[in-house]
Image (spheres, rainbow, N blue to C red):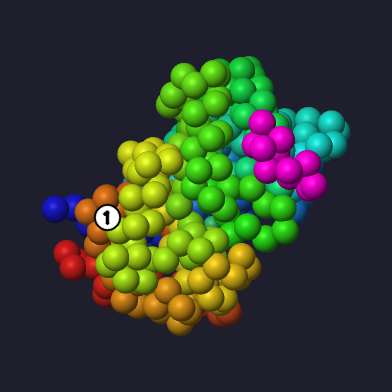
Amino acid sequence: MSRMLLGCHLSISGGLDQAIARAEELKINALQIFSHNARSWKMTPLKPDDAQKFIERRQRSKVEYAVIHTIYLINLASPDPKNFQLSVQALNDEIERAGALKIPHVNTHIGAHLGQGIEQGLERVVEALERVLASPQAKSAPDVKILLENCSGEGSELGARFEELGFVLQNINKNKNNRRVGVCLDTCHAFAAGYDLTTPQGLEKTLTELERTVGLERVALIHLNDSKFPLGSRRDRHEHIGQGPIGSEGFRLIVNHLALRDKPFILETPKDDEQSDPMNLARVWALRYDN
Ligand code: MN
Ligand code: MN
Ligand code: ZN
């Protein structure tokens, strides 16, 4: 039996390789990063030296799993042509970076329909992803997968319902199951979107729905977050593990479930102070039966 893959979203301040240093300090074997300032479209090109430093530092560490989270500005459903183009370009650039950093996954929110309606919005997302997959950047990094994250459904956000993610997966390149696209399950977002995870029956029902719409084997990453708001609130506010309505018993079920236990788990819990990450990690480790 192998140790669970568990880590946190970590800062790259001081350089990409500093995220690995932080992971070592926390004794974690998985991490997530923004590859650059997450609130800006501007992406300064990755220097080959910085990529090399990151790769070498990682090889010397125990970090087995890494993922890039895209910037929050991306809206693959945008009805505005300029914003749509910027979103496609930003995702292309993240894939190119992931390739250069030997990071296997780029995780993204799919976006918001902004009044077009869900169906129209999802069609835009399909078109965006087809463009991305046909881009020179995606072709230059054939091992990098795109993960579509479920969301809480605030405003006109798409991807709160698993069938919306399923629709996108099934329609990319005309129903040809595209193996370069998978899914990330965020526990806070799922719960806020109305999927119960807190009882064995609730979790079973949620996972059956995920299997039916997306396929559990396509879920490549779990974001492990408690929620500040109740089931179905459609609010995206993360809470420390066990301190929200998902609760310790919910997370005990999630991290030990046979369908989920071998997938990488990444915490995106609040960072109130430097004790926050060690505290949340310790809570999850304590819930795992084989740790
Ligand atoms: Mn996210
Ligand atoms: Mn998330
Ligand atoms: Zn969130």
- The image quadrant that residue 174 belongs to is top right
Task: Choose between 59 and 101: the one closer to the eye.
Answer: 101
Q: Amino acid at mark 1?
A: Arg
Q: In the figure, 245 relative to 1: above or below? A: below
For label 1, count other residues whose C-alpha is less than 10 Å away and answer few (under 14), some (14-19) or many (20+): some
- The image quadrant that residue 215 belongs to is top left
Q: Is residue 4 magenta?
A: no
Name the residue at 32% across, 71% down: 199
Q: In the figure, 245 relative to 46: above or below? A: below
Name the residue at 37% across, 42% down: 212
Name the residue at 63% across, 57% down: 153
Task: Choose between 26 and 288: the one closer to the eye.
Answer: 288
Task: Choose between 181 and 272: the one closer to the eye.
Answer: 181
- Left or right for 96, reference 251: right
Q: Position of residue 44 (x, y in %)?
A: 74, 39
Q: Position of residue 217 (x, y in %)?
A: 33, 39
Residue 206 visible in the picture: yes
Identify the residue under disc 1. Answer: 261
Q: In the structure shown, which secondary structural element does the residue marked by tag 1 occupy?
A: loop
Marker count (numbered): 1
Task: Choose between 249 and 268: the one closer to the eye.
Answer: 249
Q: Position of residue 184 (x, y in %)?
A: 47, 48
Residue 43 visible in the picture: no
Q: Position of residue 55 (x, y in %)?
A: 46, 39
- Left or right for 130, reference 211: right
Magenta region, residue range = 113-123
Name the residue at 35% across, 65% down: 202
